[in-house]
Amino acid sequence: MIDAVAGVELELHASSTPFDREGVVEWQIAGSVLVESERLADLSAPESDVATLGDDPEFTRVTIFVMRGLTLNLLEVDARDALDEDSADAAEMMPLFSADGEFTEEVEDRLGGLVGAYSFVFLDRVWLLPAWRGFGLGRVLTDKAIGMVTEAPISLVGVHSHPYEDWDEEHPDPSPDAIARTDHVWESLGFVRVSGQLFVRDESLVHPFAEERAVSLGLINRA
């Protein structure tokens, strides 16, 4: 699947898990833009994320955005077992589910009532090339990408809020300010805190952030 927003081409790659588990799909969405080749040195883009376009050496397609995660069909899998079997990061989502595989009362309380989702979408990592940060584009792309892997209104999206982009080998523990900024980003996208750093968004609740933000940035002209 290929989509686009704000001049960024978004492409979805999805596959079944290595263990061929029914009802579990791994996916990755990559967003790329065309950049004048002479500007590449200013972007600090990893070589693996740069592709020269055929016979035109003047422009290069650069990956500036990546979001990857996991989708569970809750009618086919036990959510807690599937998350536990996948990875340590995915297992952090287990407290959102009770022992019988239903969403906990805490989740429902935070969302204001019974959650009728049939699929759970876990956002593992979201990354934006530093040169494109600070303009609100990351949030627009994240919201658009979420729409590519969810089926409103039957999906619930979960994320463990952590400032991975600010990770530094010499200072592995994020600062309180970095944590607060990251939490604010997810809240601005319609996510609510359930407990600790676990945030969820119910896709049955229409959240207008992406379109409104894109209009304010001049990325979309509303007639």
Image (cartoon, rainbow, N blue to C red):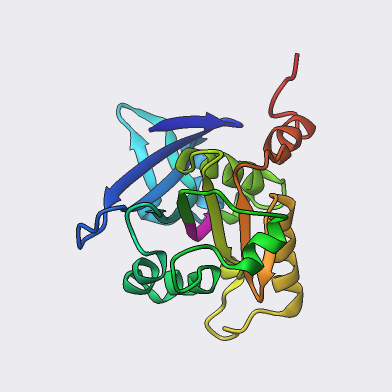
Please report the bounds of the magenta region as a residue range. Answer: 122-128
Q: In the image as oriented, which residue stretches furthest toward the top? A: 223
In this rendering, is residue 85 above or below 191?
below
In this rendering, is residue 99 above or below 37?
below
In the image, is 138 to the left or to the right of 25? right
Tell me if residue 182 can be seen: no
**Percent coordinates x, y for residue 16 in the rendering:** 26, 52
* Residue depicted at x 41% and y 31%: 2
**Percent coordinates x, y for residue 165 in the rendering:** 58, 66
* Residue depicted at x 69% and y 56%: 111
**Percent coordinates x, y for residue 81 in the rendering:** 35, 71
Q: Magenta span has 123?
A: yes
Could you tell me what secondary structure mostly forms the magenta stretch? strand
Tell me if residue 157 can be seen: yes
Which quadrant of the view contains residue 30?
top left
**Percent coordinates x, y for residue 190 in the rendering:** 70, 50
The one nearer the camera, 59 or 216, is 216
Image quarter in which the C terminus is found? top right
In the image, is 18 to the left or to the right of 96? left
Q: Magenta span has 92?
A: no
In the image, is 191 to the left or to the right of 86? right
